[in-house]
Image (cartoon, rainbow, N blue to C red):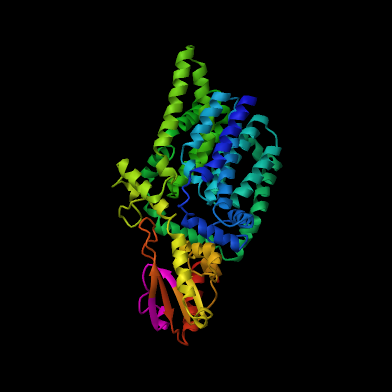
Amino acid sequence: MQQSKKVIYFFALIKCLIPFLLIYPAFELHRDEYLYLADATHLSWGYIEMPPLLALMGAISKWMGHGFYPVYFWDGLLGGLTVIVVGNIVLQFKGSITAVYIACISFLFSVFLRMHILFQPNILDVFFWTLSAYIIVLWIDTNHKKYLYFLGISFGLGILSKYTIAFFIGAFLIGVLLTDKRKWLLNIHFYMAMLLALVIASPNLYWQYSHHLPVLHHMQLLKDRQLQYLSRVQFMKDQLTITLPCFFIWILGVLFLFFSKEGRKHILIGWIYVFVMLLLLWQHGKNYYAASIYPVLMAVGAVYFERLLQQIKSAGVKRTLQLGVTLIIIGLGSFFLPLMIPFKSAPDMAKLFIGMHLGNSAILTWEDGKVHPLPQDYADMQGWREMTEKTAKAYHSLPDSIQKDLVIFGNNYGEAGALNFYGKQYQLPEVIGDDASFAFWIPDTLSKKHLLLVDFKPRKKDDFVFSHFHSLEILDSVTNPYARENGVKIMLYGQGDDSLTIASKIAIKELKQQYNLH
C-alpha cells in the first residue's frame, strides 16, 4: 500500500510540473484563457460562457502575480489532484502497484495531457467527475449515507465549474434506478444530499434566473453554429482517438464492470458511462465532453488488467505483457506528444509536423477549411503580445486630446481579453468588446468620439454604429505567420458625429437583448 501511494504521488508531481516544464516559453496563453482571466476581473456568480469557479481561481492567479506561471498553477494542481483520485480509485478496488502504475500512465498520456496545460473549465470538470465517481465507489462499498453528502458537495461544486456535469448527474440518477441502490430512493438522506448540491449551486442558478438565463442563449448559439453539424458516428470514433495510447485500458474497465462477477458490484459506474454517452449522442455533444468519464474507467481497467495478469502462471509472460502495455502507452503517448503540447518554437513545431507527414491532415486544418503550419489550438497561443504592443504603440502615438476621447475595441473575446491581460504593462485603458461576457460589461453607450478597433478588416460603410465615424486610418497590423490573429489590423476611427451616442446605445441594447441581459 505504501509503495502504491508513493507511485501515485510521484505521477501526481509529474503532472503538476508538466505545464511549467514542457510548454515552450514563446507560446502564450490560449485565446479562451484570456476570456476566463477577463472574467476574473469581473467576479460574479455567473457568466455568459461558464459558471463562476474558474473565474475565482483566475482572480487568485492575478493576486499571485502577473504572467503565465500563476495561471499554469491551476492546470498543474488540478491535474495532480486528479491523478491522486485516480490512484485512490485503484486502491479502493484493491489494486496493487501494477494497477496504480498502469492507471497513472494511462491518464498521463491521453487527452488529459492537453487539457491540463490550458486554464479552462475542463480541468475542473475532469476533477469533479472523477471525484464524484470515487465517492460513488466508496458509497457502494460502505453503503454509508455520509458519502451521499460528499457526493452532493462534489455535484454542487461541479455545477459551479462547468454545466456539463449535468450529463454525469443525469446518468447517475438513471443508473441508480437500474441497480440495487434504488432502495436509497426511499431514504431521506438521498434527497437531502441532492438538495445540498442545489444549495451549493444556488448562487449561480439564481444569477442565471435574475439575468434571464443567458446560458440558454449561449447553448442555442452553440447548437446552431456547431453542435447540430457534428456526426454521432464521428463522436464515437473520437472516443478512441482522444484516449488512443490507452483506449484498451478503459475498454477493459467497461468489460470488468459489466461482465466480471467482481466488477458487477460497481456496475453503477458502468451504467453512468453508458448513459453519459447516450445523453451526449442525443444532444450532439462535442467529442471531448465525454472525456471526463474516462479517468475512473482507466482506474478500473488497470485493476482488471492486473487481475488478468495474476491468472497467468508464467512470471516471464507476466513481465512481458506488463512491459508491452507500458511501452504501448508511453510509446504512442510520446509519438503524439507534439499534438498535445507545444514544446518547441512555432517554426520548429511546424517543421516537426511536416516530418510527421501531417502537412495536409485534418490536424492542421482550421475552421476556415485551409491547411496551416500549426494546429488551430497552437495558433491560438501566438501573436497576442505583438498585437498588444502594436496597439499600445498606436495609442500612445496619438495626441493627449484624442487619447482622452478614445475607446479601444477588441472584435472578439480573445483580442479584447489579451489586450486587457497585457494592457497594464503598456498603460492601455480598459478594452471593451461585444463578444461572450464582454457583451455584459460593455457600457450602455459609446460616448467617445474616437475608437481604436482591433479586427481583421474595417467595418462596412453602412454599419449602424461605425458609419457615424467620418475618418479611418489603419495604423498597424499583426505579422506573426504562425498566429491565428495574423493580419489583424489596428484601425483608428475618428470624428464621431453627434448621432454616435444614440446609435451605439440602440446597438448595445439589441446586443444585450440577444443574451437576455436586458
Residue 434 appears at what percent x and percent y? 48, 69
Q: Residue 370's image quarter?
A: bottom left
Check residue 174 for magenta coloring. no
Q: Nearer the viewer, residue 100 or 436?
A: 100
Q: Quadrant of the C terminus?
A: bottom right
Number of numbered discs? 0
> Which residue is at 48% across, 46% downward?
23
Q: Is residue 257 visible?
A: no
Q: Which residues are magenta?
A: 453-473
Residue 83 appears at what percent x and percent y? 57, 37
Outermost residue, top side = 313
274 on left or right of 455: right
> Which residue is at 52% across, 21% downward?
307
Task: Work out whether 88 lies above or below 449.
Answer: above
372 on left or right of 214: left
Q: Quadrant of the N terminus?
A: top right
Q: Nearer the viewer, residue 512 or 7?
A: 7
Check residue 460 for magenta coloring. yes
Residue 304 appears at what percent x and percent y? 51, 25
Q: Residue 96's image quarter?
A: top right
Q: Is residue 40 visible?
A: yes
Residue 174 appears at what percent x and percent y? 55, 41
